[in-house]
């Protein structure tokens, strides 16, 4: 495993994200998750990333319980304050709206933080992020009457947070203004960055802004929710012709480590097989060279027509019609790419007709929460028309 210097630590260059852990009957599959985390630790991964809302609130407790089987100084735990899904109520309480069918209430930022640290079973967080500082949530995070940053900075002084950071799906301008307002406070910034989003979501400018502030970048959606490991035929052929024995995922990960200010490369692996493949890749430092980068750019050109869904499933949690939006978008992408209509309809016919895209009532709940900024109602409307 490759390691990189981060303040007083040596962090594994590959980190394990826990938003897409294996599931069984709608819950985290504990045994398979334990097998993955055990394997990760034994093969050099020491960076584990969770959040309050992952797996409907189950990720923190499961990941914490498994990690605590091992000595505390052998792993680093990252958790996140979910301000992007919080609102301040008239009575001063904080309301979390990120779970389907329920709202969680907290008396203060301190109340929520104490719940998280207890769920994870730790005395301190190695790194603690503000979750998704974006163009909307930045007002919540910067609200002095709520005092999130101030409270967390105090916890850092007390040693209950070793390092502070934030993740963001926001614009470069928002990231720059937030870092300027809190100059010297944050030690890491996590953004969605991969070879497709370098241009598609202007990750290049975000990367440059963070680098200019002298802060390392942690990559999330490094393989775009697995999409860069299952490319459509045209893009897949470009990479296959260039390097027949390399996996599609390896192209994505090697592209990232070619960037000089990329720190930990985070991957939300959901199987032991994916974990083993990625760990093997990080056994040596082997970034893409200039010719390989040009090959990737050719593949990107073949991908631009896809709807850029990463299957994070934020949209499904608030959908009043219960639509499996990522699945529908995947079928739509297949149709747009000239996929077999027989295969696409075979998949669609496994879905109840009242869950087809025509069932969308265009309420906009999905659009307002989508980190990719996808106009989901319009996509579903177009797909319905084609069906």
Image (cartoon, grey):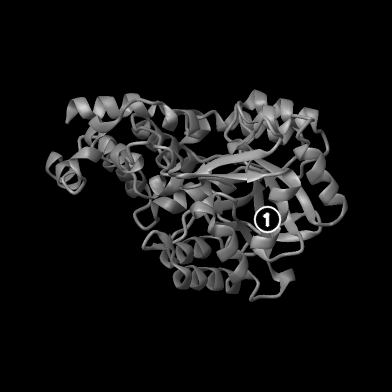
Q: Position of residue 134 (x, y in %)?
A: 61, 31
Camera-nearest residue between 150 and 296 = 150
Q: Quadrant of the C terminus?
A: top left
Badge 1 crowding class, 10 Å Cα cut-off, few under 14, some 14 to 19, many 20 or more, is few
Q: Is residue 310 visible?
A: yes
Residue visible at 75% across and 48% down?
Answer: 110
Q: Position of residue 337 (x, y in %)?
A: 25, 34
Query: Label 1, on which residue?
Result: 115
SS state under label 1:
helix
Q: Quadrant of the N terminus?
A: bottom right
Residue visible at 80% across and 33% down?
Answer: 182
Task: Point out the residue furthest to the front here.
Answer: 91
Q: Is residue 170 left or right of 336 when viewed as pictured?
A: right
Q: Is residue 129 left or right of 357 when viewed as pictured?
A: right
Q: Is residue 349 above or below residue 47?
A: above
Task: Point out the residue furthest to the left here.
Answer: 342
Q: Is residue 33 left or right of 237 when viewed as pictured?
A: right
Q: Is residue 288 visible?
A: no
Residue visible at 20% across and 25% down?
Answer: 385
Q: Position of residue 148 (x, y in %)?
A: 75, 39
* Residue 188, picture quadrant: top right
Q: Position of residue 342 (x, y in %)?
A: 12, 43
Camera-nearest residue between 275 and 146 = 146
């Amino acid at each position: 495993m490759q390691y990189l210097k981060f303040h007083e630590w040596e962090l594994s260059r590959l980190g394990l994200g826990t938003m897409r852990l294996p599931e069984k009957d709608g819950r985290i599959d504990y045994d398979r998750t334990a097998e993955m985390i055990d394997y990760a630790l034994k093969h050099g991964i020491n960076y584990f990333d969770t959040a309050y809302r992952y797996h409907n609130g189950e990720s923190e407790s499961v990941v914490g319980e498994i990690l605590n089987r091992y000595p505390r100084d052998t792993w680093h735990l990252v958790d996140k304050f979910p301000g992007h899904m919080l609102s301040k109520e008239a009575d001063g309480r904080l309301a979390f709206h990120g779970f389907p069918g329920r709202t969680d209430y907290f008396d203060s930022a301190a109340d929520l933080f104490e719940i998280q640290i207890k769920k994870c079973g730790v005395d301190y967080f190695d790194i603690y992020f503000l979750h998704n500082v974006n163009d909307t949530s930045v007002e919540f995070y910067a609200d002095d009457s709520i005092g999130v940053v101030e409270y967390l900075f105090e916890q850092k002084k007390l040693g209950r947070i070793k390092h502070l950071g934030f993740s963001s799906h926001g614009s470069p301008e928002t990231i720059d203004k937030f870092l300027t307002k809190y100059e010297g406070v944050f030690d890491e910034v996590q953004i969605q960055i991969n070879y497709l989003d370098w241009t598609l979501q202007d990750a290049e400018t975000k990367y440059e802004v963070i680098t200019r502030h002298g802060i390392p970048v942690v990559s999330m959606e490094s393989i775009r929710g697995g999409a860069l490991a299952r490319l459509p035929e045209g893009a897949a052929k470009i990479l296959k012709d260039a390097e027949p024995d390399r996996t599609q995922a390896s192209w994505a990960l090697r592209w990232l480590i070619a960037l000089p200010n990329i720190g930990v490369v985070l991957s939300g692996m959901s199987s032991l097989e994916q974990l083993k493949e990625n760990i093997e890749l990080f056994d040596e430092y082997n970034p893409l060279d200039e010719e390989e980068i040009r090959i990737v750019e050719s593949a990107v050109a073949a991908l631009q027509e896809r709807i850029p869904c990463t299957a994070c499933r934020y949209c499904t949690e608030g959908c009043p019609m219960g639509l499996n939006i990522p699945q529908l978008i995947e079928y739509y992408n297949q149709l747009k790419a000239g996929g077999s209509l027989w295969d696409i309809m075979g998949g669609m016919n496994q879905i109840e007709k009242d869950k087809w895209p025509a069932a969308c009532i265009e309420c906009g709940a999905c659009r307002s929460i989508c980190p990719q900024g996808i106009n989901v109602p319009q996509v579903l409307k177009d797909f319905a028309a084609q069906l």
